[in-house]
Image: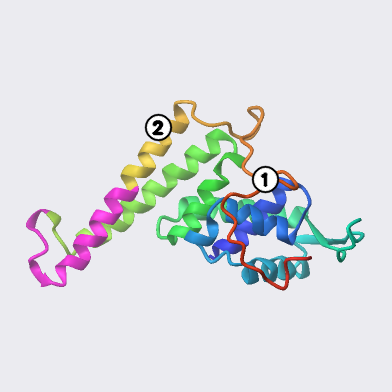
Amino acid sequence: MSAIRLLVLGAVRQHGRAHGYQVRNDLEYWGAHEWSNAKPGSIYHALKQMAKQGLLIEHETAPSTAGGPPRTEYEITEAGTEECFRLVREALTSYDQKMDVKSAAIGFIVELPRAEAVALLKERIRGIEVWRSSVTEHYVPEDGPEQLGHIGEIMNLWIHTADAEAEWTQGLIARIEGGAYTFAGEGEPFVGVLAEGAENPYATGEQHPGDPR
């Protein structure tokens, strides 16, 4: 799975309707350009591609009063919303996703009902346990990695990573079950996007041909 697809769909959905530079600004505000492939070219390309796929609708807007060119604004479709939630659910349950995909899914987890989020994370733990068991069929952690020569360090890394993933997921489940955060249907959601015209303290300032649109 590509993180950029989820990030762009999620950003447009949170705004309701947004132009490309606004989406880019949001992703830079979230620091996504640091931990994912959310670079300007990738963002603008994803917007156009998903519009062709029927996940977004393009709206041409009038030029600004300052004389700038018209912008293309994007609005998520029903199919786009379904795809966005599919990606979130897949990323939350698939423990072996890359860090950027997992991070993007956590960024949108509160878009789900609280009970569903917990259920998905518990499914994630079950997946981790199954995968860990497949490793320990060939490697006994208690005997240490030396039993397999230096290659044992690979399996040792896998086990430690799985255990850390499970511990982190259990902690997140406990916080959610304890009432942390505002999930879908529970009230005013956390506002994680910039208002139109708001200054972005994390903007890269990098110019891209797609910025005016």
In reply to whether residue 38 is colored magenta, the answer given is no
Left or right of residue 99, residue 156 in this image: left
**Which of the two marks, 1 or 2, is nearer to us in this view?**
1
Residue 20 lies, in percent from the top left, at: 73, 61
Amino acid of disc 2 = Ala
Q: Residue at label 2? A: 174
Percent x, y of residue 78:
76, 53
Question: Left or right: 1 with respect to 206?
Answer: left
Task: Give residue 10's position: percent from left, percent from top.
Answer: 65, 52
Residue 29: give x, y in percent of width and height. Answer: 59, 51
How crowded is the residue under tag 1: few (<14 C-alpha within 10 Å), some, or many (20+)? some
The C terminus sits in image quarter: bottom right
Viewer-proximal residue among 175 and 196: 196
**What are the residue bounds of the magenta stretch?**
142-165
88 left or right of 187 in image? left
The residue nearer to you, when weighing 70 against 125, is 70
Badge 2 marks a residue whose secondary structure is: helix
Quarter holding residue 185: top right
